[in-house]
């Protein structure tokens, strides 16, 4: 699209969507369902990113699994909500599913082909196969994904005032209630800041030695060729790489005990991991400095060797790959609109949601709200009790200062009024509460 301004007059009553992945397809579908004309721009096959090879829309580039279906898991809850919202991707996934136990996995080629077929069948949607290098005027949704072209990425970076990140390696997040506070203590280093800013997880020498040996011998996840970028380790070094540089390297880095006194011991720990609040509610904590590319099973095994994390529930494992995303908490409203330009929306992984269905979910909300704005209707935002609403609030939460991508997680939801000790029963209750809330909200809107 060489000059998006040329046809502005003709397309004032249309929504332009940049990107034909999960988010773009969902946004186009939702807008079309509301009678809005859509121009959906997809650069394939004119140009392919290093990760893409299929000409179809909503191409899967990694796993063919959309995670578990059961309501007692966050991914299952999210898909159930999306189904209520008329998700195209969930519908197509169920139609092209392959056996995968309790997970929803698909034949990737059939899935992409079905999404493409359904999009092309809509008279309201025109698919335009060309690379977009400028951000158009008028109602627009940018759903370009984590591998947006360099030209478009530069325009987005300029628009966002330089707030465009390359997410190389991220640390795990654990639920607050799963931290063993009997083996931890609250204190800021050198007593700077508030005492409860950090949870400290101390280790004695013997515990550290065992942890260190497990860490340097743990199995690392494979890195895709398109994720390998010069300087990735120096810019955001995984804890296992840092540890390999010397026995005490991490004791003078992320696990340094300087400025801390364990009140149970009365002196400084041999090594110490700090946990920092991930959200203002304090229901999730980030393992500070523990960016990693270990396999998920290895993260669980090795990091659980830290005494305070023995029974830790990992809400998000650490990952390492290229992921272009904007600093959404400072740039986006909770309906995924750009604060400085109300007719511009973002959707998908570029907003900081992590995962196929999370990206599709962002596309659903962006598509609904862009259409509502054109139709003069109120914005639509599911309640904070829903997974869709919780994700929208997470990416727009201005209290988050160190923003990193997040997938569906029960840690994003407010706790139940009545505490349930059994974890599975608690998750099922959270899912039931959220679905009931969404159904009530949809009934009112009908």
Image (cartoon, rainbow, N blue to C red):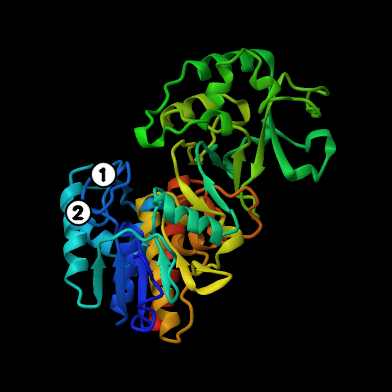
Quarter location, residue 9: bottom left
Q: Nearer the viewer, residue 299 or 403?
A: 403
408 is higher (above) or lower (below) than 177 = below
10 Å neighbourhood of mark 1: few (<14), some, or many (≥20)?
Answer: some
Q: Mark 2–mark 1 contact, CB under 8 Å?
A: yes
Q: Which residue is mark 1?
A: 64
**Residue 204 on image: x %, y %:** 69, 17
Q: Earlier in the sequence, mark 2 or mark 1?
A: 1
Residue at x-position 26% and y-position 51%: 59
Q: Is residue 57 left or right of residue 168?
A: left
Residue projecting furthest to the bottom: 376
**Residue 229 on image: x %, y %:** 45, 33
Q: Say which element carries label 2.
A: helix
Is the N terminus in the top left, top right, bottom left or bottom right quadrant? bottom left
Q: Is residue 304 visible?
A: no
Q: Which residue is mark 2?
A: 111
2 is higher (above) or lower (below) than 209 = below
**Residue 101 on image: x %, y %:** 24, 42
108 is higher (above) or lower (below) than 83 = above
178 is higher (above) or lower (below) than 260 = below
Residue at x-position 57% and y-position 69%: 339
Q: Say which element carries label 1.
A: loop
């Amino acid at each position: 699209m060489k000059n998006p301004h040329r046809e502005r007059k003709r397309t004032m009553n249309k929504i332009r969507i940049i990107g034909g992945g999960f988010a773009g397809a969902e946004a186009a579908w939702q807008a079309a369902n509301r009678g809005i004309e859509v121009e959906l721009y997809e650069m394939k096959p004119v140009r392919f990113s290093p990760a893409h090879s299929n000409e179809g829309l909503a191409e899967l580039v990694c796993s063919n699994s959309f995670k578990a279906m059961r309501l007692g898991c966050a991914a299952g809850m999210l898909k159930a909500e999306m189904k209520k919202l008329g998700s195209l991707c969930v519908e197509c996934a169920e139609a092209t599913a392959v056996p995968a136990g309790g997970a929803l996995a698909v034949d990737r080629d059939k899935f992409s082909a079905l999404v493409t077929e359904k999009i092309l069948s809509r008279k309201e949607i025109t698919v335009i196969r060309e690379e977009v290098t400028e951000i158009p005027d008028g109602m627009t949704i940018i759903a370009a994904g984590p591998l947006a072209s360099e030209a478009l990425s530069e325009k987005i970076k300029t628009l966002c005032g330089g707030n465009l990140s390359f997410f190389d390696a991220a640390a795990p997040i654990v639920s607050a209630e799963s931290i063993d506070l009997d083996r931890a203590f609250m204190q800021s280093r050198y007593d700077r800041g508030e005492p409860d800013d950090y949870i400290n997880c101390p280790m004695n020498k013997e515990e550290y030695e065992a942890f260190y040996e497990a860490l340097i011998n743990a199995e690392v996840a494979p890195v895709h060729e398109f994720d390998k970028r010069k300087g990735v380790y120096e810019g955001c070094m995984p804890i296992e790489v840092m540890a390999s540089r010397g026995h005490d390297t991490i004791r003078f880095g992320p696990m340094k005990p300087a400025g801390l006194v364990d009140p149970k011991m009365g002196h400084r720990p041999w090594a110490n991991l700090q946990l920092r609040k991930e959200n203002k509610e304090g229901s999730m904590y980030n393992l500070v400095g523990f960016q990693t590319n270990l396999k998920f099973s290895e993260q669980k095994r090795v990091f659980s060797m830290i005494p305070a994390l023995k029974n830790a529930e990992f809400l998000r494992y650490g990952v390492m790959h290229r992921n272009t995303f904007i600093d959404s908490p400072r740039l986006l409203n909770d309906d995924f609109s750009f604060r400085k330009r109300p007719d511009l929306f973002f959707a998908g992984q570029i907003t900081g949601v992590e995962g196929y269905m999370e990206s599709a979910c962002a596309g659903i909300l962006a598509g609904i709200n862009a259409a509502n704005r054109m139709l003069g209707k109120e914005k639509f935002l599911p309640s904070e009790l829903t997974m869709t609403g919780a994700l929208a609030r997470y990416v727009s939460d201005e209290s988050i200062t160190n923003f990193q991508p997040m997938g569906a997680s029960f840690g994003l939801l407010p706790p139940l009024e009545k505490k349930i000790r059994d974890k599975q029963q608690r998750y099922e209750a959270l899912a039931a509460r959220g679905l009931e809330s969404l159904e009530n909200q949809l009934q009112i809107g009908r």
